[in-house]
Image (cartoon, helix red, strand yellow):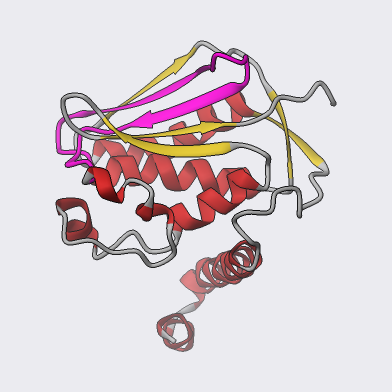
Amino acid sequence: VALAIAQQRANSEITGELERIKEAADYLNDVISDILSLPVTEQGSWELTDVVEVCSLISTISEDCKDEASQKSVTLNLTDNLQEALVMTRGNTLVGVFDNIIRNAIRYTVEDSLVSITLDRNSEGCPQITVSDCGPGVEAEHLEDIFEPFFRTDEARDRKSGGYGLGLAIAQRTVLHHQGTITATNNLVRGLSITITLPETAEL
């Protein structure tokens, strides 16, 4: 509604920008509806027809997030021990996953702190991406609950933003339908880490 009102009142200089916002909102609405309609327990319901190079993808997203990070004097530290990993995907669905998780880390970390993004392989050799912040973390009993749609707590992370909303719920469903895993753990000192593991492919 707010966007429609803005379009009615807009002058020619910003009409194009508002139209791009509308297109992006429509796209996100379709993606959200598509993903949330998928069951969490059944993997493989999506046909994965595209291939993405994970390191390049995350590097690009990290660059896009630097302006937002700098506004809080937050340093984005990308450590790439993976170098290159091809993953089967569907369209741009993984872009939304990593963009959401990195921006969440920036949002919840304290000012003048560090957000670490580490690309590596797990014990089975699969690509593993971990995003760690220096924020308040999450109570241990809620570490799985935060992936539920519309889940809210009374903890510090929730009070700051009004809730987790749909971002992590969408991320979980997307990762599961890529035959991957996503987990949340509290850091030893402070903050939260989100770790995503994806199966690698040799297809080009």
Task: Tell me: 60 left or right of 164.
Answer: right
Decide which of 25, 192 is in the foreground and name it. 192
Give the total of numbered labels: 0
Q: Is residue 19 magenta?
A: no
Above or below, comparing residue 55 to residue 184 in the picture: above
Quarter of the image with the C terminus is top right
Decide which of 71, 126 is in the foreground and name it. 126
Decide which of 24, 156 is in the foreground and name it. 156
Question: Which percent across, then down, holds residue 70?
Answer: 26, 36
Q: Residue at x 33, y 34 (%)?
A: 185
Quarter of the image with the N terminus is bottom left
Question: Which percent across, then down, holds residue 196?
Answer: 51, 33
Above or below, comparing residue 82 to residue 177 in the picture: above
Residue stretch rendered in magenta on the structure: 109-138
Decide which of 146, 81 is in the foreground and name it. 146
Question: Which percent across, then down, holds residue 192?
Answer: 28, 36
Above or below, comparing residue 180 to residue 37 in the picture: above
Q: Residue at x 23, y 45 (%)?
A: 138
Task: Tell me: 35 left or right of 66.
Answer: right
Question: Which percent across, then down, holds residue 87?
Answer: 71, 30
Q: Residue at x 43, y 88 (%)?
A: 5
Q: Residue at x 59, y 56 (%)?
A: 40
Q: Is residue 130 magenta?
A: yes
